[in-house]
Image (tube, helix red, strand yellow):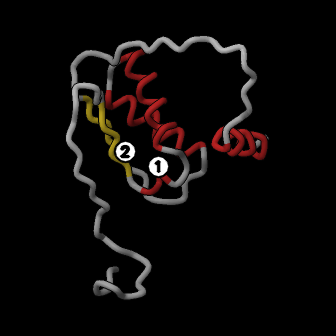
Amino acid sequence: MKGPKGSTCPLSSEPELEEMVLTEEDEFLIIGCDGLWDVMSSQYAVTIVRKELMTHNDPEKCSRVLVREALKRNTCDNLTVLVVCFSKDPPPRIEILKSHKRRSISAEGLDLLKGVLSNV
């Protein structure tokens, strides 16, 4: 499955690692394989998990919601998701001030809309 380092073999079992120092502001961690990140941005996944945690505060349910969303988006890769919470309490609500400015749809929103419309 894996060739020697530097080979042209398309598969690799070496994980992408990044070391970070957590702060008090960090609420949870989403660990997912390509099947998740190929079909949604990290910000979209964070938005889903945060909303779900505020509703039921269950990281296992959040993982399932992300898997279902990735499947709806027709992921074609391995799909494993794990949500780790750093607090037993749900995340606090964030107040977002209403803006009177008109907003356009994001690229991710446009892709989601195209996916929905192509399934109709």
Q: Amino acid at mark 1?
A: Leu
Please tell me whether mark 2 sits on a helix, a strand or a loop. Answer: strand
Q: Amino acid at mark 2?
A: Val
* Residue 38 image point, x, y percent: 52, 55
Q: Is residue 118 above or below residue 28?
A: below
Label 2 Cα neighbours within 10 Å, binned few <14 / some 14-19 / many ≥20: some
C-alpha span from label 1 to label 2: 7 Å
* Residue 76 image point, x, y percent: 54, 59
Which residue is at a point 30% across and 70% down the rendered structure image? Answer: 13
Residue 72 located left or right of residue 12: right
Q: Is residue 80 above or below residue 103?
A: below
Residue 117 lies in quadrant: top right
Report which residue position mark 2 lands on.
81
Q: Is residue 53 above or below residue 48?
A: above
Q: Which mark is residue 36?
A: 1
The foreground one among 63 and 12 is: 12
Q: Quadrant of the N terminus?
A: bottom left
The foreground one among 7 and 104 is: 104
**Cβ atoms under marks 1 and 2 closer than 8 Å:** yes
Which residue is at a point 67% across and 38% down the rendered structure image? Answer: 106
User: Of the residues under marks 1 and 2, which one precedes in the sequence?
Assistant: 1
Please tell me whether mark 1 sits on a helix, a strand or a loop. Answer: helix
